[in-house]
C-alpha cells in the first residue's frame, strides 16, 4: 500500500493530511465548549486596561514573564492562588508565556502597587538591585492608543458576546463619549504617581503608555 | 530512466533562496547573540532606543531565524532537490519558473515587512505567530505559491515514485498550512468597530485555555514541520548524495515517516503541563512525547547506518562530519524533549533556561548544521565552482561545535539550578530564595551563552564568506561532481 | 569500550557532575522526589544520547554496508531493503504498547488530579511544620522572618529594610518627618486599630513641625506641648496605649500585623495588603525580624 501511495502523490498527500489532522480533532475540540466559561464575577477589561495590555503585547513582556501559576506550593507561596481556566475567559490572546526570566505576573496586582511599578518601570535596578529587566522609560512619553483599545472592546462585545455595557457601540460618537470615562480612570492611577510629565499629560487629556500599563498590571489579581 | 546528463536543471530560484538563507542567517544570529548578551549585560538594552530592548528583539530573533533563515534554507534545498529526485527541470515549464520566482520575491518582500512590523511593535504576542493579520495574509499567499510550484513540479515528474525527501517536503507544506491557518485566526478590530483605531490590530478568535491549546498545537508542530520534517528531507538527500552510499533501510524510512506524522501532532500539550488544560490532555501530551523518541531516532539511526563502514569519509570530508553531528544533535534534542515532557521533570524544566537550551541543541546542532551542509553540497553544482576553502570549513566545524556545546551545557546547568531554586524551601518551610536571587545566580551562565553566540556567529560568517568566495572566485569545474563535493 | 565511547561518556559524566555540583552549592535538597526524577532524567538524556549515537558511529569504523538494493534510484541514490534494527524495532513496539496501555488503563485507573496532588502537598507541609512553628523561640522566629522578608518584602523595602531611599518605609528608624507630617495633615483610617480612624489636622503649622521632628527623632528629649493632642490616643509615651493606636516608638507585632494584613497608603507610596498570603506565624516572624532592623 505504501509503495502505491508513493507513486500517487495526490493520495499520498491526502493520507498525510488525514494522519496529521486526526490528533487535533480529538485532542483540541473537546475542550472548546468548556474552557471558555468565565469564573463567577469576572469582569471584562476596561478600555484603559486593554490599552495597557496592548503595551504589554507591543513591548512583548511575555518574553520574560509568565501569567500562569502552577499548582505547586512553591508557586502559590510566591505568587498566590494557582490559576484557574475561567480566569482567562476574556484573554484574547492568552498570555501565559513560556519563559520566566522574570517572575510570574498573573496576580502581581495583589502585591505590587502603582508607585512601585512607576519606580520599577522607570529603572528596575533602583528597586531591585541586580535586576536584568530593561528600563522602559519610553512608556512615560509614548501616548497609549486608547482608540484601538476601545475598538477591541467593541469587537469582542459584538463578535464574542463579551459582556460590555450598552454604551459600547461601533460608532465615533460612542467612542468620543467614552473617552471621559477612560480619562477619569487614568486620573485615579496618576493620583498615586509622582512623575510630573505623566501627570501633566493626563491632565491635558493624553494618556501615556505607563498609565495604561499600570492599570493593566494592577488588574492582574 | 533517462540519464542525468540529458537534463539541465535550472537553479535560479534555489540560488535566490540561498542568498536569503545567508542573509537572514546572519541577521537572525546577530540578534540572537545580542539578546544573549543583554541577559548577561543589561546595559546593552539601550543601543537602539525602544526598538532595542530584549523583549522587542526576542521575537525578531525567533522569527528571523525560523521564517527567514530556516525557511529560506528549506526553499533553497527544495528547489534544488526536488528537480533532481523528480527528474524534471524547472526550465521545462514557464509556469513553474514563474511560480518559483513569484514565490521568492513575495517571500523576500514579505519577510522584510514582517520583520519591520515586529520591530515597530505590531505583534499578536503569540509565540511563533506574532505577525499581525495583514502579514499573515501575505504569508498564506507565499505558502500557497510554494505549494503550487511543488505540486506542478510533481505533476510533470519523470520519476514515478516519490523519493523520501519529497515525502517530507510535502508533509512540511501540508502541516504548516493547516496549523498556521487555525492558529492565526483573528478578527481585525478596525473592521468590526466601524473604523475605529489602528487597522493593524486584531483579537484572537480563541480565548484563554482554548487559545493556549491552539497556540501550542501550532507551536509544537512548528517544531515538527519547520525544524524537523524538512530538515529530515535534507539529510535523506544530502547525506547519501555526498557520501555515495545507499540508504540503509527503506523499511526504517517508512516506519519513521508515518510514525512521525501520526505521533507528532498528539504531543503539543507538553507545552501546557500543569496549566489549566485538563489533566487527560496533558497526560496524552506526555505519553506521546515519549513514544515520539522512536520515529525521531529512526531517521537519525537510518542516517548513521547509511555511513556504516565509511569512517574514512567521516574523517576526511567536513560535510559528512557536519551531517553526522547533526544527526546526533537531532538525537539529543529528541530525547531531551520527551524527558522534559515527563510531568515531574517539566515541573522543574518549564519556564527555565533548560528549555532554550533544548531548543538550541536542535536548531544550532541540527537545523543550522544541516542547512549549511546542504548549501555547501549544492554550491559546486549550482555555480559549477569548487568550494573555496576546506580549511575554513574545518575550522568552522570545530568552532561551531564548541559553541553548541557551550550553549547547551550552560543553559542545562542554569535551567536545572534555577528550576530547583524556585522550589527550594528552608528548614522552616518558607521559600529559600527571592526571585532576584535566582536571576543573579545565572549571570556566569548567561555570559557563557553570550560567548557561545559570538563563536557560533563567527562560524556562520565563515560559512557565508566561504560560500560567497565559492561563487565569485572558486575554481571552475568542468563537470558536475558525482558524489563528494570538491573543495580547495 | 573504545576510545570514542569513553570520551563520550566522560563528557556526559562531567556535565552531570557539574550540574550536581552547582545545584548542591545552592543547598538544594536532591532527595525531593521532583528534584530527584529531574536529575535522573538529565542523566538519562546525557548517557543514552552519547551511548546510542556512539554505538552507531562506531559501526562506521567496524562494520561494512551491504544488503539487497531496491529497484529505484533517485538522482543516483539507492536504498537497501535491510530489516529494521532490532533494538529500535522492539523499543518502538514497546513504547506504542505502553502508550496504549497507559491511556486506556494505566492513567484512568490512577485518576490523577493535579489539584488533588496540590492539596495533598499543602496538607503534608502543614503537618510537617505545624509543631515546629508553634514552639518556635525568639531566635527561630527572627531567622524565619528574615527569609520571608527577603522573598516577600525586599522588593519594596530593600534587602536591608532601608526602604530603598524613600521608595518604601525605612525600618532602620521608626518614621520619617515627611511621613508623620503627612498623617497629621491627612489623618488615617486603614490599619484597623481598635481606636479606628485618626482625624486629620490634629496639629498644624509650627506645632506639627515640632511634633514631627520629635516623633521622627525617636521621641527623645523634651516633648513639644502640642504633642498633647496626640497623647490622647497614642499615649504620652507614644506607645499606643496597649495596642489601641499605633505604637510610635518601635515596630511592634500589632503594627506589623496590621500593616501586613491591611496594607498602607502614606506619604511614600502604597503598600499592598498581604491579607491571605501570610499565616499568623509568618507575621509573628516578620515582626520579630523587623524589630531587629532598628539601626
Ligand atoms: C521528540 C521530539 C521532541 C519532544 C517530545 C520535545 C519536547 C519539548 C518540550 C517538553 C518542550 C518544553 C515545553 C515547556 O516546558 O515549555 C519543548 C520545547 C521546545 N522544543 Fe522540543 N521536543 C522535541 C524535539 C525538538 C526539536 C528537534 C526541536 C528543534 C529543532 C525542538 C524545539 C523546541 C522549541 C523551539 C521549544 C520551545 C518552545 C517554547 O517557545 O516554549 N524540539 N520541546
Ligand atoms: C548565534 C546563535 C544564537 C544565539 C546566541 C541565540 C540566542 C538566543 C537567546 C538568548 C534566546 C532567548 C532565550 C531566553 O529568552 O531565555 C533565543 C531564543 C530562541 N532561539 Fe536562538 N540563538 C541563536 C541562534 C538561533 C537559531 C539559528 C535558531 C533557529 C534556527 C534559534 C531559535 C530560537 C528559538 C526558537 C528561540 C525561542 C526559544 C523559546 O522560546 O523557548 N536561535 N535564542
Ligand atoms: Ca518560548
Ligand atoms: Ca499571526
Ligand atoms: Cu513541543
Image: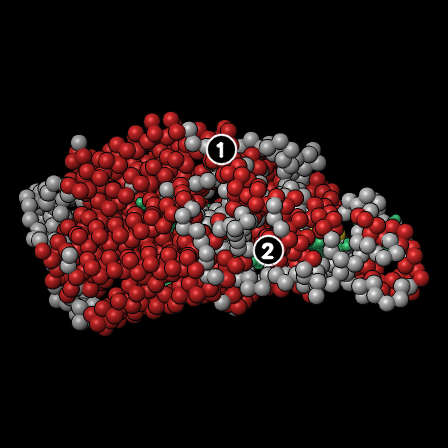
Element at label 2: helix
Q: Nearer the viewer, mark 1 or mark 2?
A: 2
Residue at the location (24% across, 33% down)? A11
- The answer for which chain carries disc 2 is C
Residue B259 position within the rendered picture, expressed as x and y whole percent measured from the top left: 25, 38
Tell me the SS state at disc 1. helix
Quarter of the picture holding the N terminus of chain C: bottom left
Of residues B96 and B34, the one nearer the viewer is B34
- Tell me: is circle 1 under 8 Å from ligand 1: no
Q: Quadrant of residue C37?
A: top left
Q: How crowded is mark 2: few (under 14 residues within 10 Å), some or many (20 or more)?
A: some
Residue at screen point 76% across, 57% down: C250
Between B373 and C111, the residue placed more toward the observer is C111
Chain at numbered mark 1: C
Report the disc number at residue C143.
2
* Disc with the residue nearer the chain's start (1 vs 2): 1
Q: Callout 1: few (<14), some (14-19), or many (20+) C-alpha neighbours within 10 Å?
A: few
Is residue A49 rendered to the left or right of residue B130? right
Q: Is residue B72 left or right of residue A143?
A: left
Is A31 located above or below residue C271 in the figure? above
What residue appears at the point 23 percent right and 59 percent down from the top-left corner?
Answer: C8
* Residue plotted at (37% across, 30% down): C107
Is residue B186 visible in the rendered structure shown here?
no
Which of the labelled discs sits on residue C116, or is there none? Answer: 1
Apparent side of residue C40 relative to residue C173 in the rendered image (left or right): left
Could you say where residue C165 lies in the image, as x and y percent from the top left? Answer: 69, 65
Q: Looking at the picture, how far across and down is residue C192, in whole percent?
A: 78, 44
User: In this view of the protein, which residue sits in the foreground, B131 or B105?
Assistant: B131
* Residue B107: % across, % down: 38, 53
Q: Where, quadrant-wise, is the C terminus of chain C in this rendering? A: bottom right
The answer to whether one can see residue B386 in this image is yes
Amino acid at each position: 500500500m505504501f509503495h502505491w501511495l508513493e507513486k500517487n502523490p495526490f493520495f499520498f498527500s491526502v493520507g498525510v493530511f488525514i494522519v496529521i489532522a486526526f490528533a487535533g480533532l480529538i485532542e483540541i475540540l473537546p475542550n472548546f465548549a468548556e474552557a471558555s466559561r468565565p469564573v463567577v464575577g469576572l469582569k471584562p477589561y476596561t478600555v484603559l486596561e486593554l490599552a495597557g495590555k496592548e503595551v504589554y503585547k507591543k513591548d512583548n513582556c511575555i518574553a520574560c514573564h509568565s501569567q500562569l501559576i502552577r499548582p505547586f506550593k512553591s508557586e502559590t507561596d510566591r505568587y498566590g492562588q494557582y490559576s484557574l481556566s475561567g480566569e482567562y475567559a476574556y484573554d484574547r490572546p492568552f498570555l501565559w508565556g513560556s519563559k520566566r526570566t522574570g517572575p510570574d505576573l498573573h496576580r502581581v496586582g495583589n502585591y505590587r502597587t502603582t508607585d512601585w511599578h512607576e519606580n520599577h518601570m522607570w529603572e528596575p535596578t533602583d528597586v531591585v538591585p541586580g535586576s536584568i529587566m530593561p528600563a522602559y522609560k519610553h512608556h512615560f512619553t509614548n501616548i497609549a492608543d486608547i482608540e484601538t483599545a476601545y475598538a477591541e472592546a467593541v469587537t469582542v462585545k459584538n463578535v464574542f458576546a463579551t459582556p460590555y455595557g450598552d454604551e459600547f457601540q461601533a460608532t465615533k460618537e460612542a467612542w468620543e463619549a467614552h473617552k471621559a470615562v477612560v480619562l477619569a480612570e487614568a486620573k485615579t492611577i496618576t493620583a498615586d504617581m509622582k512623575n510630573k510629565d505623566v501627570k501633566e499629560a493626563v491632565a491635558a487629556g493624553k494618556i501615556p503608555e505607563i498609565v495604561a500599563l499600570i492599570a493593566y498590571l494592577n488588574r492582574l489579581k | 530512466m533517462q540519464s542525468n546528463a540529458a537534463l539541465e536543471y535550472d537553479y535560479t530560484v534555489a540560488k535566490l533562496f540561498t542568498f536569503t538563507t545567508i542573509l537572514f542567517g546572519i541577521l537572525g544570529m546577530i540578534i540572537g547573540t545580542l539578546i544573549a548578551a543583554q541577559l548577561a549585560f543589561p546595559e546593552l538594552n539601550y543601543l537602539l532606543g525602544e526598538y532595542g530592548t530584549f523583549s522587542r528583539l526576542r521575537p525578531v530573533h525567533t522569527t528571523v531565524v525560523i521564517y527567514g533563515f530556516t525557511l529560506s534554507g528549506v526553499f533553497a534545498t527544495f528547489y534544488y532537490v526536488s528537480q533532481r529526485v523528480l527528474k524534471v527541470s524547472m526550465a521545462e515549464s514557464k509556469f513553474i519558473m514563474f511560480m518559483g520566482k513569484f514565490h521568492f520575491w513575495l517571500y523576500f518582500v514579505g519577510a522584510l515587512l514582517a520583520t519591520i512590523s515586529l520591530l515597530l511593535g505590531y505583534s499578536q504576542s503569540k509565540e511563533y505567530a506574532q505577525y499581525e493579520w495583514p502579514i499573515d495574509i501575505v504569508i498564506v499567499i507565499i505558502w500557497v505559491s510554494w505549494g503550487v510550484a511543488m505540486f506542478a513540479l510533481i505533476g510533470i515528474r519523470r520519476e514515478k515514485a516519490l523519493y523520501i525527501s519529497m515525502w517530507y517536503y510535502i508533509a512540511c507544506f501540508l502541516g504548516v498550512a493547516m496549523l498556521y491557518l487555525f492558529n492565526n485566526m483573528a478578527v481585525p478590530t478596525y473592521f468590526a468597530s466601524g473604523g475605529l483605531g489602528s487597522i493593524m490590530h486584531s483579537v484572537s478568535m480563541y480565548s484563554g485555555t482554548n487559545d493556549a491549546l491552539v497556540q501550542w498545537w501550532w507551536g509544537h508542530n512548528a517544531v515538527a514541520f519547520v525544524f524537523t520534517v524538512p530538515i529530515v528531507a535534507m539529510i535523506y538527500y544530502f547525506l547519501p548524495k555526498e557520501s555515495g552510499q545507499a540508504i540503509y533501510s527503506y523499511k526504517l524510512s517508512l516506519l519513521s515517516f508515518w510514525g512521525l506524522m501520526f505521533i507528532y501532532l498528539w504531543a503539543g500539550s507538553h507545552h501546557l503541563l500543569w496549566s489549566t488544560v485538563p489533566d487527560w490532555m496533558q497526560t496524552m501530551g506526555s505519553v506521546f512525547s515519549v513514544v515520539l523518541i522512536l520515529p525521531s531516532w529512526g531517521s537519525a539511526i537510518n542516517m548513521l547506518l547509511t555511513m556504516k563502514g565509511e569512517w574514512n569519509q567521516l574523517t576526511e570530508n567536513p560535510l559528512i562530519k557536519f551531517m553526522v553531528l547533526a544527526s546526533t544533535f537531532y538525537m539529543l534534542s529528541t530525547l531531551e524533549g520527551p524527558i522534559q515532557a515527563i510531568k515531574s521533570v517539566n515541573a522543574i524544566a518549564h519556564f527555565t533556561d533548560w528549555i532554550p537550551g533544548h531548543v538550541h541543541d536542535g536548531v544550532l546542532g541540527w537545523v543550522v548544521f544541516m542547512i549549511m551542509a546542504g548549501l555547501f553540497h549544492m554550491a559546486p553544482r549550482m555555480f559549477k565552482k569548487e568550494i573555496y576553502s576546506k580549511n575554513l570549513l574545518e575550522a568552522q566545524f570545530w568552532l561551531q561545535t564548541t559553541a553548541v556545546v557551550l550553549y547547551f551545557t550552560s543553559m542545562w546547568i542554569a535551567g536545572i539550578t534555577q528550576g530547583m531554586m524556585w522550589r527550594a524551601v528552608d528548614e522552616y518551610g518558607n521559600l529559600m530564595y527571592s526571585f532576584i536571587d535566582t536571576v543573579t545566580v545565572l549571570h556566569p551562565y548567561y555570559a557563557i551563552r553570550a560567548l557561545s553566540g559570538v563563536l557560533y556567529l563567527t562560524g556562520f560568517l565563515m560559512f557565508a564568506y566561504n560560500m560567497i568566495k565559492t561563487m565569485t572566485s572558486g575554481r571552475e569545474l568542468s563537470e558536475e561532481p558525482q558524489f563528494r563535493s570538491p573543495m580547495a | 569500550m573504545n576510545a570514542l565511547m569513553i570520551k563520550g561518556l566522560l563528557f556526559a559524566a562531567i556535565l552531570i557532575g557539574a550540574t550536581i555540583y552547582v545545584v548542591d552549592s545552592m543547598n538544594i535538597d536532591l532527595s525531593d522526589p521532583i528534584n530527584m526524577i529531574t536529575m535522573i532524567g538529565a542523566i538519562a538524556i546525557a548517557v543514552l544520547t552519547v551511548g546510542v549515537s556512539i554505538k552507531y558511529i562506531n559501526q562506521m569504523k567496524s562494520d561494512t554496508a551491504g544488503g539487497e538494493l531496491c529497484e529505484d534510484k533517485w538522482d543516483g541514490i539507492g536504498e537497501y531493503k535491510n530489516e529494521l534494527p532490532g533494538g529500535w524495532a522492539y523499543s518502538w513496539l514497546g513504547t506504542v504498547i505502553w502508550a496504549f496501555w497507559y491511556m486506556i488503563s494505566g492513567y484512568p485507573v490512577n485518576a490523577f488530579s493535579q489539584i488533588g496532588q496540590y492539596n495533598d502537598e499543602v496538607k503534608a507541609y502543614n503537618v510537617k511544620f505545624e509543631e515546629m512553628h508553634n514552639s518556635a523561640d525568639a531566635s527561630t522566629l527572627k531567622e524565619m522572618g528574615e527569609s520571608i522578608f527577603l522573598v516577600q518584602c525586599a522588593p519594596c523595602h530593600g534587602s536591608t529594610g532601608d526602604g530603598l531611599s524613600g521608595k518604601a518605609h525605612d525600618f532602620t528608624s521608626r518614621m520619617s518627618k515627611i511621613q508623620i507630617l503627612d498623617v497629621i495633615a491627612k489623618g488615617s483610617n486603614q490599619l484597623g486599630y481598635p481606636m479606628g480612624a485618626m482625624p486629620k489636622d490634629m496639629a498644624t503649622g509650627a506645632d506639627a513641625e515640632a511634633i514631627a521632628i520629635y516623633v521622627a527623632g525617636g521621641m527623645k528629649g523634651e516633648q513639644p506641648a502640642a504633642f498633647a493632642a496626640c497623647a490622647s490616643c497614642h499615649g504620652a509615651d507614644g506607645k499606643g496605649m496597649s495596642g489601641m493606636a499605633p505604637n510610635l516608638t518601635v515596630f511592634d507585632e500589632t503594627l506589623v500585623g496590621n500593616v501586613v494584613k491591611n496594607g498602607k497608603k502614606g506619604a511614600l507610596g502604597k503598600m499592598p495588603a498581604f491579607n491571605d498570603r501570610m499565616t499568623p506565624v509568618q507575621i509573628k516572624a516578620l515582626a520579630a525580624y523587623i524589630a531587629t532592623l532598628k539601626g
